[in-house]
Amino acid sequence: MKLTYLGHSCFQLEIKGKQILFDPFISFNELAKAIDVNSIEADYIFLSHGHADHIADAVSIAKRTGAKVVANWEIHEWLNKQGVSNTHPMNTGGKWEFEFGTVKAVVAQHSSGLPDGSYGGNPLGFVFMTEEGNFYYSGDTGLTLDMQLIPKWAKLDFALLPIGDNFTMDVADAVICAEFIQCNQVVGMHYDTFGFIKIDHEAAIGAFRSAGKSLLLPAIGSSLDI
Ligand code: NI
Ligand code: MN
């Protein structure tokens, strides 16, 4: 499937002809200035949690495109109050069959308050099981033993994991996560955007290579087939 990196934890994946956007944070991202947020197409928007660096552009993109927004119950209710009515609520442990495949919501160890102070429920990760491949989008999370359950549900082709430390897993913990989820191909996210999470790219790639795994760090705005 086609994967486009839009900076921070924002990706666009094309599955069965549907454009699926994750955690849009583009217009406020200094590193993503070259991307025109008004040109982004979306049929679905998945939100891992309520923090601004994951949902800043969600309402505007959802209203412009009419995309269905998938998030936890509390963010679903908050979006409805913002005038975004095409939403699908999920919560930890549940799965749903969408037109592009099945998605299971899984544990993320993080927090989820919304930018206006509203309660944002629990953060989520998502396991996608589709005819074009299976993957795990972890959202912001620390390393947790719950990740060991994921291979019981899906044989993963790749995973999108945070590697920036401070707020989430660092590279070393992401390598352990990749072992827990039995996945050899990882795309890094949640790094470099702010001062707290700047990383050494070569060291990160080397750490995964030493564990017999590959870490991809695509340039912001670039696409690859995965
Ligand atoms: Ni967060
Ligand atoms: Mn974050």
Image (cartoon, rainbow, N blue to C red):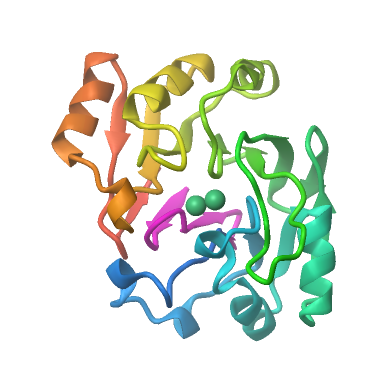
Q: Position of residue 86 (x, y in %)?
A: 81, 72
Q: Residue at x 31, y 71 (%)?
A: 30
> Closer to the camera, 39 or 145?
145
What x and y, as percent, mark residue 107? 68, 32
Q: Is residue 224 above or below residue 212?
A: below
Residue 140 drawn above or below residue 205: below
In magenta, the rendered stretch is: 1-21
Examine the rendering and report whether any part of residue 99 can be seen.
yes
* Residue that appears at 55% across and 65% down: 52
- Kindly indicate the quadrant of the structure image that contains residue 200: top left
Residue at the (83%, 77%) spot, across then down: 81
Q: Is residue 130 visible?
A: no
Q: Is residue 208 magenta?
A: no
Residue extending farthest to the front is 117
Examine the image and state in which quarter residue 113 appears: bottom right
159 left or right of 60? Answer: left
The residue located at (61%, 71%) in the rendering is: 58
The quadrant of the image that shows the C terminus is: top left
Residue 110 x, y percent position in the rendering: 60, 40
Q: Is residue 46 above or below residue 129?
A: below
Q: Position of residue 37 (x, y in %)?
A: 45, 79
Q: Is residue 15 magenta?
A: yes
Q: Is residue 83 left or right of residue 36?
A: right
The mark tally for this picture is 0
Placement of 140 over or under 18, stated as above or below:
above
Query: Could you tell me what secondary structure mostly forms the magenta stretch?
Result: strand
Q: Quadrant of residue 60?
A: bottom right
